[in-house]
Image (cartoon, rainbow, N blue to C red):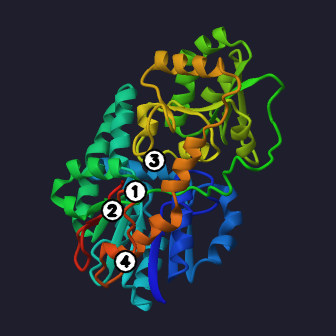
Amino acid sequence: MDHLLYLTHRIPYPPNKGDKIRSYHLLKYLAQHYHVHLGTFIDDPDDWQYIDTVKQLCEDTHFASLNPRTARLRSLGALIMNRPLTLDYYRNNDLQEWVKKVIKTQAIKRVLIFSSAMAQYVAGIQQARCIIDFVDIDSDKWRQYAKRKPWPMSWLYQREARLLLRYERQMARTYDASLFVSEAEANLFKQLAPESAAKIGFFNNGVDSDYFSPNREYPDPYQPNMAAIVFTGAMDYWPNVDAVRWFAQEIFPTVLANHPHARFYIVGSRPTAAVQELAQLSGIVVTGAVADVRPYLAHAQLAVAPLRIARGLQNKVLEAMSMAKIVIASPQAAEGILATSGKELHIARDSQEFSRIIISILAKAEERFSETARARILEDYNWERSLMHVKALLTDTPTTASEFCKPDKNTWIVPAIPRLTTYKEKQQ
């Protein structure tokens, strides 16, 4: 097997949050085909316990410690250098030296970069085939943040959006292919970076549908006769915080007035003070970290994803759909998901629509499962099928669609790059 350099901005384990789910499945798949040299950061002290698990999948590893508070202070130096704060936040001399050593000693011919922040470590490399998985358009998230923050943070976030987009476009021009988490995300970046449109593609996330299965027995975490509405996610992530606050303050009171037995459960680790304060409101429960989110999904009446700020693909929605739950999502949370509103999930565009749909569903107490949602996941969100496209992009051998495409599956867009043909797999 050939040697491959894989750089991620956060240790790809455990697969318990959006970016880690994708980066872990990438690592597991790559380990089957390459000798993987992994360079990554650890920004949560609890994650040091997992390094031996990750090492088992790799030929070589380098784990760089990242203290978020120190990194934020360090990144302020970028203000006078006219560069994105993101790059300085993830700058590490020891990791840079390790990357140089690996490239030199292992004659690296293939590089996979996970997130734009890690591209700086292979700047100027020419002897390797380089693929970057942007996952989301990070610059656009900063743009969205700027809209919802007062000055001076709005100015700072707008600056980061502008400079990071400039850097993302530069990377897209430089590397052999740029990938995103959904066709919608890829299409947006094509508009932002039209000069690289021919090299921009996507591969869908998958879902472990056996793990997130409604056909298992789960203990019921709710009280009898309770109609539980559940939100899952890391509760120190600002878009999630914004989502649950909006739902708790603008949507749930109307629901509760119509259904006094309803309860809104906020399930996720590291809830901020703003999230914890919501537990003081009637009918709202903040659990903090739980050992397993599946019981909360399995026994909930429905799941909600009221995100107003979002980019990419929301794993929380896919996992709830895999559990055959009725899901009500904002357009932002549903973007990029292959589903029909009113069939596999429900899309609510404002607080009134959220309230109306939820009140209607709760009135039908027997409605708790959505087999169409589960079927959609089984059909279109399979890791093995998704990741074979990444393998094709990393190869030096010309590849054609006929080798692995099936006409009855999802639309796949693979970039037209040197030594690889462009193709589309049409959805029937």
Residue 15 spot, x, y in % from top left: 61, 58
* Left or right: 422, with 306 as reference point: left
Front: mark 3 or 2: 2
Distance between mark 4 and mark 2 Cα atoms: 12 Å
* Dot 3 or dot 2, earlier in sequence: 3
The answer to which of marks 1 and 4 sits earlier in the sequence is: 4
Residue named by callout 4: 403
Instruction: Say what amino acid the circle numbered 3 marks.
Output: Leu
| Marks 3, 4: nearer the viewer | 4
SS of the residue at dot 4? Answer: helix
Q: Earlier in the sequence, mark 1 or mark 3?
A: 3
Earlier sequence position, callout 1 versus callout 2: 1
Q: Is residue 407 above or below residue 130?
A: above
Q: CA distance from mark 1 to mark 4?
A: 16 Å
In front of the other: 376 or 105: 376
304, 117: nearer the viewer: 304
Q: Disc 1, disc 2: CB below 8 Å?
A: yes
**Residue tagged 1:** 410
Q: Amino acid at mark 1?
A: Asn
Badge number at residue 313: 3
